[in-house]
Image: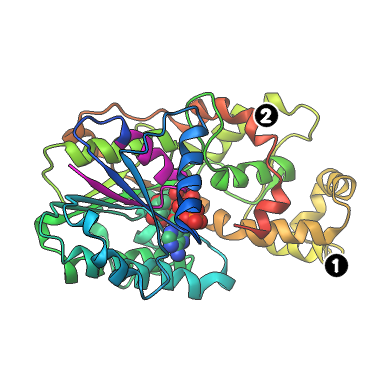
Amino acid sequence: MDVFLTGSTGFLGGEILMDLTNRKEVGKIFCLVRAKTQQEAVERVKKVFFLHGDHFDENRIIPIAGDLSEDKLTEELIANKALETIETIVHSAANTSFSKIFDTMVKDVNIAGLQRILKWSATLKSLKTFVYVGTATICGKNILNRTVLEEESPDVNAEHVVSYTYTKMTGEQVLHEFLREEQILVVRPSIIMGDSRPWAPRSTVILWTLATVNLLRLVPVNPLAQLDIISVDFASQAIVELLFAKRKHQVYHISSGQAGATNALKITGAIEPHFNHRPPFKFVNTSHVKQMVAWAKNHPPKPGDELEGNTAHLNYWNDIFESRGRLRILLFALEPYLEFMELGQIFDNSKLIEDTGIKQPLPAHEYIKNSIKYLEKIDVFEGAVDP
Ligand SMILES: NC(=O)c1ccc[n+]([C@@H]2O[C@H](COP(=O)([O-])OP(=O)(O)OC[C@H]3O[C@@H](n4cnc5c(N)ncnc54)[C@H](OP(=O)(O)O)[C@@H]3O)[C@@H](O)[C@H]2O)c1
């Protein structure tokens, strides 16, 4: 079967591309890529293969230059005769920014861009499956400290930490306007961080959070709040297995579930012995965030502020940051991630495990050891301004 994949230059999409390439059931893979020219599109996809020395077969992998945020995309795809026999679409592309300044772009790519793809999809006579890569965090911030089931979302009344999850929720609803029910497969990864194999992850996006926490050492989050974190290789394997599995459901969490759950204490405990030159991790209440921001704005802690009791860490910050403005940049970017970490949400993965037969994933505090040397290389300031 021929597949059309979006987001192949991204963290998860790149891994999905590799896993699809390794399946004998898959014929050609057409990859929608942002590029000014066809040649640039080819070069970008080649890079995805070359990262870990995979073979790029130009007869099988067909990059297509196109942009989800452009209205002409639908017409361009309809006009492309080579795409008429597509049986499977995997839509992994999205704008995943948590920053408010990108809200308009996030909406345009994740909702209008999806609609542009769907309008074309609806014209395909052979289309059997449209895989929509959503996110488990569409359940919103009102669910606290418990396991979440697939059926609980989408919930139009859910309150969202960031617009991104709202757009991903809306995306799920939009699918039904264009596709037949049997064509829809929604996969909802939880939090994808790093790779469980001992090599460079395709992206350091969520690892950035850990690198930042690792630098700050004073961490304003509940260390015991449960976290549902998976590696990119597990996420991709699960999605591709589901595509070929005998599925009993339309929606699946791609997640650690209770069996592979972790927390901030376990993850920092796993990396701590590798960074002895830094002060020990200290977890403090989230109420410290405001006080930290005030300190970063050069306001001294007020009498009675809890932050006052952390002079060792404040002195350490004075030593490592050229200016407090640098700390402010980090805190600003970190805040939404801290909010997610505080929710204590675990996403039930029993449907995924049952229908694919794959093994439960390793907990993040176990596989993260393979990413330690990459963690050290992350420029946290660069990551903070380019989320
Ligand atoms: N990472 C996670 O923790 C996580 C968790 C749950 C769900 N997800 C979902 O998983 C999917 C993949 O996420 P990811 O982590 O792989 O994100 P990513 O690394 O940021 O990749 C996003 C991909 O989308 C493409 N894209 C963005 N805007 C586009 C546009 N206007 N036109 C065409 N392509 C565009 C990017 O292309 P460029 O290379 O040109 O930028 C890139 O290939 C998303 O749907 C996301 O919502 C991710």
Look at the image and tell me in which quarter the C terminus lies.
bottom right
Q: Is residue 156 visible?
A: yes
Of badges 1 and 2, nearer the viewer stands 2
Whether label 1 lies within 8 Å of ligand 1 gets the answer no
Question: Is residue 177 shown left or right of residue 15?
Answer: left
Whether label 2 lies within 8 Å of ligand 1 gets the answer no
Q: Is residue 265 magenta?
A: no
Asked which secondary structure carries label 2, the reply is helix
Q: Amino acid at mark 2?
A: Glu
Q: Amino acid at mark 1?
A: His
Cα separation, mark 1 vs mark 2, equals: 30 Å
The label on residue 299 is 1
> How many other residues sit within 10 Å of disc 1, few (<14), some (14-19) or many (≥20)?
few
Please give the name of the residue rendered at 71% of the width and 45% of the height, measured from the top-left corner. Answer: 379
Residue 385, given in percent of the width and then of the height, sits at 67, 59
Q: Is residue 16 magenta?
A: yes
Bounds of the magenta span?
1-20
